[in-house]
Image (cartoon, grey):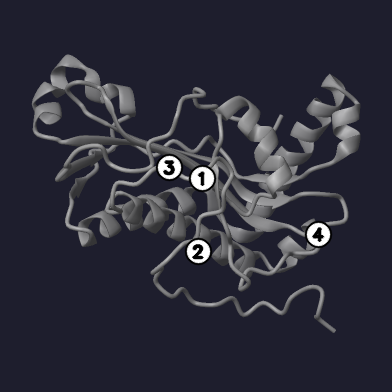
């Protein structure tokens, strides 16, 4: 239930193993809709029928949320790609996106493009939306990113990482059972929880902006990771801090727990 488009359980390479100057960013993969989920042990206890009930609730919440906040899913994907290309350029890479699906780059017609590119960046955005770890806990903007850099000629993995934001440690461990370990990036104290789904709807603009900020930070994190010195990967599950992130406009929302 908690996993989608799981990656193979292979060791990560969160650092570049060879020099890369030109990067082609494949079409960002992000599913078809937002995920607005509250982990409910009752659904888990109900077996397959509980999974179906949970899927219905998640789909309904995503639909209702976008009715209030607009096409947030597409906004997130568009912002992520735009921010990533700009951030990579700022790091000195020649970054480009031809908006092709990852496997399309390996077609015979794309040979010249492959030969002129040092690295092909393949990214999947998962669990993108809002996550609540329990029935009595608030919603936080959430995102899990699976990313790898592939040599377009040899197909060797030059860089790979998985990281999550806004998802609690217990849930991440459950997801990791299928995906292999991932790093957890803290959201920061400026992100306050939305008490329940109705609170998300009542503050649609503010919660949408919170999610967009998380998406932007994830894109910056990837660009910075590609410029980090080669080091031994961190221990599985160890928290990793986001440094040197650009300041984003703070939300004007009055938190649900302090609102009078």
**Residue on which the image places disc 4:** 196
Give the SS element for disc 1. Answer: strand
Of marks 3 and 4, which one's residue comes earlier in the chain?
A: 4
Residue 234 is left or right of residue 112, and the answer is: right
Q: Distance between the residues labelled 3 and 1?
A: 13 Å
Q: Distance between the residues labelled 3 and 2?
A: 26 Å
Comparing labels 3 and 4, the label whose residue is closer to the camera: 3
- Which dot marks residue 213? 2
- The residue sitting at 37% across, 36% down in the picture is 13
Comparing labels 3 and 2, the label whose residue is closer to the camera: 3
Q: How far apart are marks 1 and 2 (CA)?
A: 16 Å
Task: Classify 252 as above or below 235.
Answer: below
**Residue on which the image places disc 3:** 233
Query: What percent of the width, then of the height, locates residue 110?
Result: 15, 23
What quarter of the picture does the N terminus occupy?
Answer: top right
Circles 3 and 1, Cβ within 8 Å, touching? The answer is no
**For the view shown, which residue lies furthest in the front direction?**
232
What quarter of the picture does the C terminus occupy?
Answer: bottom right
Comparing labels 1 and 2, the label whose residue is closer to the camera: 1
Comparing labels 4 and 1, the label whose residue is closer to the camera: 1
Instruction: Classify residue 120 by image quadrant.
Output: top left
Of marks 4 and 1, which one's residue comes earlier in the chain?
A: 1
Of marks 1 and 2, which one's residue comes earlier in the chain?
A: 1
**Residue on which the image places disc 1:** 163
């Amino acid at each position: 239930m908690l996993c989608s488009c799981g990656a193979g359980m292979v060791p990560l390479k969160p650092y570049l193993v060879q020099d890369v100057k030109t990067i082609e960013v494949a079409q960002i993969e992000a599913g078809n809709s937002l995920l607005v989920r509250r982990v409910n042990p009752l659904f888990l206890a109900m077996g397959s029928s509980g999974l179906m009930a949970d899927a219905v609730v998640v789909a309904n919440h995503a639909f209702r949320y976008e009715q209030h906040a607009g096409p947030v899913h597409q906004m997130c994907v568009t912002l992520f790609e735009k921010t990533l290309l700009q951030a990579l350029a700022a790091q000195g890479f020649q970054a480009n996106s031809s908006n092709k699906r990852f496997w399309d780059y390996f077609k015979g017609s794309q040979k010249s493009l492959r030969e002129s590119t040092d690295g092909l960046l393949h990214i999947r955005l998962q669990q993108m939306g809002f996550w609540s770890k329990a029935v009595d806990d608030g919603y936080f903007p959430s995102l899990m990113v699976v990313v790898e850099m592939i040599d377009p000629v040899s197909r060797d993995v030059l860089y790979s990482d998985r990281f999550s934001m806004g998802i609690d440690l217990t849930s991440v461990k459950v997801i990791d059972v299928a995906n292999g370990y991932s790093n957890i990036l803290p959201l920061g104290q400026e992100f306050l929880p939305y008490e329940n789904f109705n609170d998300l709807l009542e503050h649609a603009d503010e919660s949408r902006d919170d999610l967009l900020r998380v998406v932007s930070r994830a894109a910056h994190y990837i660009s910075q990771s590609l410029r980090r010195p080669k080091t031994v990967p961190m221990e599985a599950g160890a928290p990793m801090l986001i440094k040197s992130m650009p300041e984003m406009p703070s939300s004007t929302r009055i938190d649900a727990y302090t609102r009078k």
